[in-house]
Image (cartoon, rainbow, N blue to C red):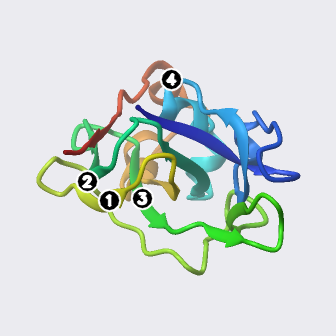
Amino acid sequence: MITYFFTGADSYLAAQPDKDKSLGGFVSSSPVPNDIIGALFTDVSFYTVTNNLRETKAIVIKNETGSLVTALTTWFENMAVSPFVELEIAAVALTEDTTCTPSTFSMEKISNVRGTPINATFYKPDTLLGAVNLGNIANTEMLGLWLRMTLKDDIQDTYYSCDALNTSPLTETQDKVVWHFDWT
């Protein structure tokens, strides 16, 4: 099984279950709940739309399958029909600190959800054909993943063109994005 963990812990493998603090840094011992995308990002609000804000979060995946995972790929399903957001992903190797016993692992840290990591290249794997190849992950190894949610270009015109108090399209609709991982 591939396990997902929040980042942003005060020390390596310390508990850190707050999605809003999952901004890189140390790997936490707190698993991301099953509804991964919904567990990471906040709701799209009127303020978010009118200011065209984006969010960036960091998690770590760990190979706990008991064997080498080869040709690991990932993509998002239902992005083409999503009326509100686009999702991007960037994979980064964790930095190992061997001066600690045992070694600790961390990744770049951003100061807030509006930040962008310097050492990451983002991709939009919005279909199986556009899946991102994450490579191989040995048993018990980890990989850092940055996830970035941006609003679609026409969201402000589509949902807030005439009436600033018209929030019903965003409050009554919820995107159902599915995040896939596949490997051999």
Q: Nearer the viewer, residue 86 or 19?
A: 19
Looking at the image, residue 8 lies above or below residue 100: above
Mark nearest the camera among 3 and 2 is: 2
Residue type marked 4: Asn
Q: Spatial distance from mark 3 to mark 2, Cα to Cα?
A: 19 Å
| Mark 1 and mark 2 residues within 8 Å of each other at the beta carbon | yes
Q: Spatial distance from mark 4 to mark 2, Cα to Cα?
A: 23 Å
Q: For the N terminus, which image quadrant?
A: top left
Q: Spatial distance from mark 3 to mark 4, Cα to Cα?
A: 18 Å
The residue wearing badge 2 is: 70
Q: Which mark is residue 68?
A: none
Dividing the picture into quarters, in which one does residue 89 lie? bottom left
Name the residue rendered at 39%, 55% in the picture. Answer: 137
The residue wearing badge 1 is: 136
Compare marks 4 and 1 and give the one earlier in the sequence: 4
Compare marks 3 and 4 and give the one earlier in the sequence: 4
Name the residue rendered at 70%, 63% in the picture. Answer: 106
The residue wearing badge 3 is: 89
Mark nearest the camera among 4 and 1 is: 1
Residue type marked 3: Ile
Q: Is residue 64 left or right of residue 25?
A: left
